[in-house]
Amino acid sequence: MQLLRVAWALTGAAICCFLILLIHSRLLKEGQLAAGTCEIVTLDRDSSQPRRTIARQTARCACKKGQIAGTTRARPACVDAGIVRKKQWCEMVPCLEDEGCDLLVNRSGWTCTQPGGRVKTTTVS
């Protein structure tokens, strides 16, 4: 009798797991992103100029309501839409932990300054 109960419990658990996987696969079809996440689609680097590298990246994001694609800790991320609307770029914490963030004078982007003095400039089109 005890063995029969265990068998039914395991069967129920297996069916439950199967249903969860089935529902999950229906909600997140191949190529879809989970809400609030981003992925890098393309990344191009141009090092043709001495001492200067121009990098362009394209990200695909599935942001939640009130969020928009941005940058956090040098990675694409969903950020509060108000930050982008007000062009307060440093509020989305775009630089790495040991870097300082400064807005460009015309608010068209920001700079991340490393402790050694190296500066990375990001402009928003």
Image (cartoon, grey):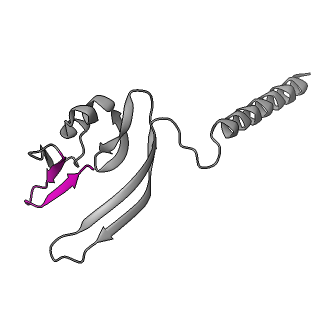
Q: Is residue 112 highlighted in magenta? A: yes
The image shows residue 9 at horizontal and vertical percentages of 81, 26
Q: In this view, does 71 lie to the left or right of 33?
A: left
* Residue at x 22%, y 48% (from the top left corner): 95
**Residue 104 is at least partly visible in this image:** yes
Q: Nearer the viewer, residue 71 or 14?
A: 71
Provide the residue span drawn in magenta: 108-125
Residue at the image point whose x is 73% and y is 37% from the top: 22
Q: Can residue 98 be seen in this view?
A: no
Query: Closer to the camera, 94 or 66?
Result: 66
Q: Name the one closer to the observer, 1 or 61.
A: 61
Number of dots carrying numbers: 0
Up the image or down, 112 lies above or below 2; here it is below
Q: Where is residue 40 in the image (x, y as percent from the top left)?
A: 43, 54
Residue 71: x and y in percent read 31, 45
Q: Which residue is drawn at 13% across and 55% down?
A: 114
Residue 57: image quadrant is bottom left
Say which residue appears at 65% left-offset and 35% top-offset.
Answer: 27
Question: Where does the N terminus fall, quadrant-wise?
Answer: top right
Residue 59: x, y in percent?
Answer: 41, 51
Judge left or right: residue 71 versus residue 9: left
- Residue 122 in the image: above or below residue 79: below
Q: Is residue 92 left or right of residue 7?
A: left
- Residue 110 lies in the magenta-colored region: yes
